[in-house]
Image: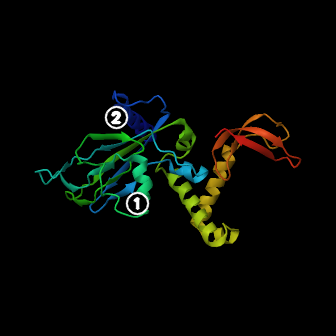
Amino acid sequence: DPARRRRWAREVARTVFLERADVDLSKAHGVAVWCLASGENAAVDYHLDYCELHRHETNEIVVPLYASTVQLADLVDDGADARTRIEGGAFLVNSGGLAHYERYGYKGRLGGDAFSGPGWHRVPYARNRAIVHDGEWPHAAEKIRALPPGVKRVILGLNVFCDRVAEVNARAPEHSDAFNKTVKLYQATARAKKHGGGLTVEALTKNKPLARLFVGLARAREAASDDVDSTDAFEAGARVKARWRTGVRRWPATVKRVRNDGTLDLHYDD
């Protein structure tokens, strides 16, 4: 039931963030919430949270104001009872922030051992434990070495975002079906451009799943468009909202020039 899930997500966000005195939510617009269930041998590599779909559409990385991991399963790190014991799977976070991430990069791909050196904090898994940290802090999760039979480690992830990414999070919430489909399409488009100069009708004909994603995005763009079919109604100095490159989101801008062919020169607020 989507309505029930939203109510539950709001209650979790309220408990985790609004009841804390040390969290400044003056710039917060909303909270993205998702769930992750993992079995043995699963791990989460070194990374930084950010609004991924926004990055694909604008090439801008926006990190959350705050991030949280809530541990839900009835498990205890190295507990005495085998029925509730989890080995490994602890949450790891580095307080070095963006400077640390700039050095090592996504999944440590810039080289070196991202897990060496100072700034690391290990938080063992325990039911109903909520971890809150600055959105700029890179983090990971240890490999799960052992779990009770038939049990998974379950966590809720929460990101508090500013209004800069409000529209894209509402349109395609992190890890939702709409989010996954759209990101896959952007990734496929990037690969096609890298290897063959872009998507073609022939390529889409041969790749039915990609074709369906492409059609879905086209329909989303059409639904998001407004009723203005011509630029004749605009003049220099007019305030508008317009897409940037191939993105779906509209950004505030000022018309600087109306060209003879009907196109506009825009100056975006950002």
Q: Is residue 100 left or right of residue 196?
A: left
Q: Nearer the viewer, mark 2 or mark 1?
A: 1
The quarter of the rendered structure image containing the C terminus is top right
Q: Amino acid at mark 2?
A: Val
- The first of marks 2 and 1 along the sequence is 2
Residue depicted at 43% across the width and 37% down the height = 6
- Tell whether 174 sits left or right of 257: left
- Between residue 39 and residue 264, name the one nearer to us: 264
Provide residue 23's location: percent of width, then percent of height. 38, 31
Numbered circle sitting on residue 16: 2
Query: What number of labels is visible?
Result: 2
Instruction: Name which quarter of the figure residue 47 lies in.
Output: bottom left
Left or right of 118? Residue 7 is right
The N terminus lies in which quarter of the figure?
top left
User: Where residue 260 sits: x, y (%)?
Assistant: 89, 47
Q: Nearer the viewer, residue 243 or 265?
A: 265
Give the image's coloring scheme: rainbow
Asked if marks 2 and 1 touch (Cβ < 8 Å), the reply is no
Q: Which residue is mark 1?
A: 107
Q: Position of residue 5 (x, y in %)?
A: 41, 40
Q: Secondary structure at mark 2?
A: helix
Residue sitting at 36 percent across and 36 percent down?
12
Q: Is residue 33 left or right of residue 247?
A: left
Q: CA distance from mark 2 to mark 1?
A: 27 Å
Count neighbours of disc 2 (C-alpha within 10 A) and say few if under 14, some if 14 to 19, many if 20 or more. some
Residue type, label 1: Lys
From the top left corner, tell me how far across and down residue 258 is, in percent. 84, 42
